[in-house]
Amino acid sequence: MGTLVDVAKATGTLKRFMRAAKTAGLIDNLEHGGPFTVFAPTDKAFAQMDEAALDALFDDPERMRTVLENHIVASKLSSRDMGSKRESQTLGGEPLRITPQGGTAGIEVSDAHLVIPDLEADNGIIHAIDEVLLPRSKSA
């Protein structure tokens, strides 16, 4: 199976997320920590962001870490587990709203949809999502 890092690299659609995790200094945690649930924005999700805002994020490792920590939960949640859960706290302290809408394709996490659910890793699970979740409580 491999670590969360191995699984993310193997998908081929999470290259920008991996670059963001490296910028944020989170690779070691994703390789050796856990168990974690990672709601990883796809490359397409990053591409939908304003280019200047995205560049600014990649130029600021601390801010990138804040953003990415709000995509990670310190427990393993499969899409099946999310069917009975309504909220989960992220490493960054932001609550993630979980809204099941019938089947794994219908699960919403805050403002994002699961596009590739249940990518199992030795130290957790990854769900690829279609949006970058920006923190609400901190101004950018």
Image (spheres, grey):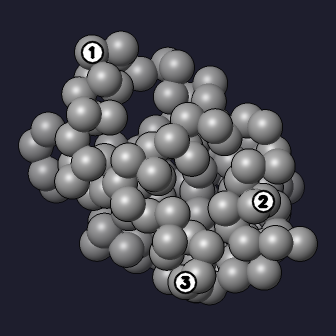
Residue shown at the point (57%, 47%) measured from the top left: 18
Secondary structure of the residue carrying tag 1 is: helix
Distance in Å between CA atoms under marks 1 and 3: 32 Å
**Relative vertical location of residue 30 with respect to residue 140 in this rendering, above or below:** below
Distance in Å between CA atoms under marks 2 and 3: 14 Å
Neighbour tally class for label 2: few under 14, some 14-19, many 20 plus, Cα within 10 Å: some
In the image, is 55 to the left or to the right of 140? right
Please state, as top left, top right, bottom left or bottom right, where the N terminus lies in the image: bottom right
Secondary structure of the residue carrying tag 2 is: helix
Q: Which residue is mark 3?
A: 33
Q: Which residue is mark 2?
A: 7
Query: Which residue is farthest top?
Result: 51
* Viewer-nearest of discs 1 and 3: 3
Which picture quadrant has residue 44?
A: top right
Depth check, front residue: 43 or 77: 43
Please state, as top left, top right, bottom left or bottom right, where the C terminus lies in the image: top left
Neighbour tally class for label 1: few under 14, some 14-19, many 20 plus, Cα within 10 Å: few
Q: Looking at the image, do the residues carrying marks 2 and 3 touch, with CB atoms under 8 Å apart?
A: no
Q: Looking at the image, do the residues carrying marks 1 and 3 touch, with CB atoms under 8 Å apart?
A: no
Distance in Å between CA atoms under marks 2 and 1: 29 Å
In the image, is 4 to the left or to the right of 98? right
The kind of residue tagged 3 is: Gly
Q: Which residue is mark 1?
A: 52
In the image, is 135 to the left or to the right of 43? left
Residue 96 visible at all = no
**Relative vertical location of residue 139 with respect to residue 57 in this rendering, above or below:** below
Horizontal and vertical percent position of residue 20: 45, 44
Residue shown at the point (47%, 53%) measured from the top left: 21
**Relative vertical location of residue 67 with respect to residue 74 in this rendering, above or below:** above
The mark that comes first in sequence, 2 or 1, is: 2
Secondary structure of the residue carrying tag 3 is: loop
